[in-house]
Image (cartoon, rainbow, N blue to C red):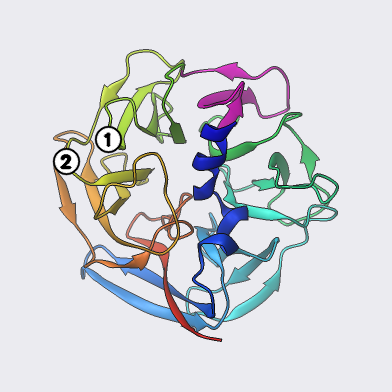
């Protein structure tokens, strides 16, 4: 249990423990344009929010804040909350199916003390979600292009691994068996691969494996702690978030990070942003625009209470 407790420091429900005493969070939402190589600030608020998804029709970004999901226009206009019925403890692991019709949400339950996370699905327009995973914690990260399977990170018997489950619910399938942390699974747009981050080499790096979990292949090899590969619609590159200092098996809030672009063929990595204050919540989930020309992310700052 000690191992679990240490690893869970990276997950969203323990954020309050990571904010220095006497400080509060300022969150800024950015859109990065690949053509210009620039980040445009669209919204800054004196509160904490996380993990933008881009809707499949391109009309809004979806963020989580205080257990709710909110819509923000690409120009930074606040468009209100998405109705998620009785699900009211959403964390930063959420996202859309490739056809844009279904939203997957990871959320705790108020009756479970000490933190929990179950996976639900709901219409992209909102409504009462359907619970998919019976066990906690389970953190959604990806869905197959044909909408038949979803993949997620979960703790079972004291270890974080990657699991798959039919999107209509059913038996979960374990895809990784390493003793170290495996996290952040996401399908490639062609459904051939699942990209993950893994500590199996003794450093957090990006890996990929076939959709059945076979033939793992390392994709990054440097001295950064690399997390959360989000595959562009063209299936040629992926964004990753890199901690400048080794974070072992954690991805905490409030560290120096930068966003980088991984070439999925050559495995070359290039910087997209300068270093900034971020980490947990910055870009946990798929955030590409439908045309693959831009992506969204957040930066953080602290101020005195």
Quadrant position of residue 155: top right
Report whether 2 appears left or right of 218: right
Report whether 151 appears left or right of 254: right
Is residue 185 shown to the viewer in this render?
no
Query: Which stretch did the figure color magenta?
Result: 150-176
Classify the position of the C terminus by image quarter.
Answer: bottom right
Q: Which mark, residue 185?
A: none
Residue 246 picture location, percent across and down: 27, 47
Q: Residues within 10 Å of mark 1 (few under 14, many from 20)?
A: some
Check if residue 302 falls in the magenta segment: no
Classify the position of the N terminus by image quarter.
Answer: top right
The residue positioned 38% from the left and 79% from the top of the image is: 41
Is residue 56 shown to the viewer in this render?
yes
Q: Main secondary structure of the magenta part?
A: strand
Mark-to-mark CA distance, 2 and 1 = 9 Å
Q: Which mark, residue 203?
A: 1
Residue 300 picture location, percent across and down: 43, 72
Q: Is residue 278 above or below residue 74?
A: above
Q: How crowded is mark 2: few (under 14 residues within 10 Å), some or many (20 or more)?
A: few
Q: Are marks 2 and 1 in contact (CB under 8 Å)?
A: no
- Secondary structure beneath dot 1 equals loop
The residue positioned 68% from the left and 42% from the top of the image is: 117
Q: According to the image, label 2 marks what residue?
A: 222
Q: In this view, does 99 lie above or below 77?
A: above
The residue positioned 29% from the left and 53% from the top of the image is: 243
Report whether 23 appears left or right of 229: right
16 or 266, which is in the foreground? 16
- Secondary structure beneath dot 2 equals loop
The residue positioned 81% from the left and 44% from the top of the image is: 112
């Amino acid at each position: 249990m000690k191992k679990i407790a240490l690893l869970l420091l990276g997950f969203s429900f323990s954020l309050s423990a990571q904010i220095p005493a006497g400080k509060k969070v300022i969150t800024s939402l950015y859109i990065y344009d690949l053509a210009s190589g620039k980040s445009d600030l669209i919204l800054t608020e004196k509160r904490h929010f996380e993990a933008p998804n881009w809707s499949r029709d391109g009309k809004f970004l979806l963020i989580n804040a205080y257990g709710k999901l909110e819509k923000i226009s690409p120009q930074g206009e606040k468009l209100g909350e998405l109705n998620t019925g009785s699900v009211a403890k959403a964390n930063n692991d959420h996202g859309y199916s490739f056809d844009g019709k279904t939203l997957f949400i990871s959320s705790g339950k108020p009756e479970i003390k000490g933190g929990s996370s179950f996976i639900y699905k709901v219409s992209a327009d909102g409504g009462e979600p359907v619970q998919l995973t019976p066990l906690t914690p389970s953190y959604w990260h990806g869905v197959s292009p044909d909408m038949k399977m979803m993949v997620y990170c979960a703790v079972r018997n004291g270890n974080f691994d990657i699991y798959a489950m039919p999107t209509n619910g059913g038996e979960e399938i374990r895809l990784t068996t390493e003793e170290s942390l495996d996290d952040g699974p996401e399908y490639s747009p062609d459904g051939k691969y699942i990209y993950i981050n893994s500590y199996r080499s003794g450093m957090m790096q990006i890996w990929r494996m076939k959709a059945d979990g076979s033939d793992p292949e390392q994709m990054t090899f440097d001295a950064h702690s690399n997390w959360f590969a989000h595959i562009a619609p063209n299936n040629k590159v992926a964004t990753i978030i890199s901690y400048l200092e080794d974070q072992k098996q954690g991805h905490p809030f409030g560290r120096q990070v930068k966003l980088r672009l991984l070439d999925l063929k050559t495995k070359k990595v290039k910087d997209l942003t300068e270093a900034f204050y971020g980490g947990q919540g910055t870009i946990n989930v798929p955030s590409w625009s439908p045309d693959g020309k831009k992506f969204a992310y957040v930066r953080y700052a602290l101020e005195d209470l």
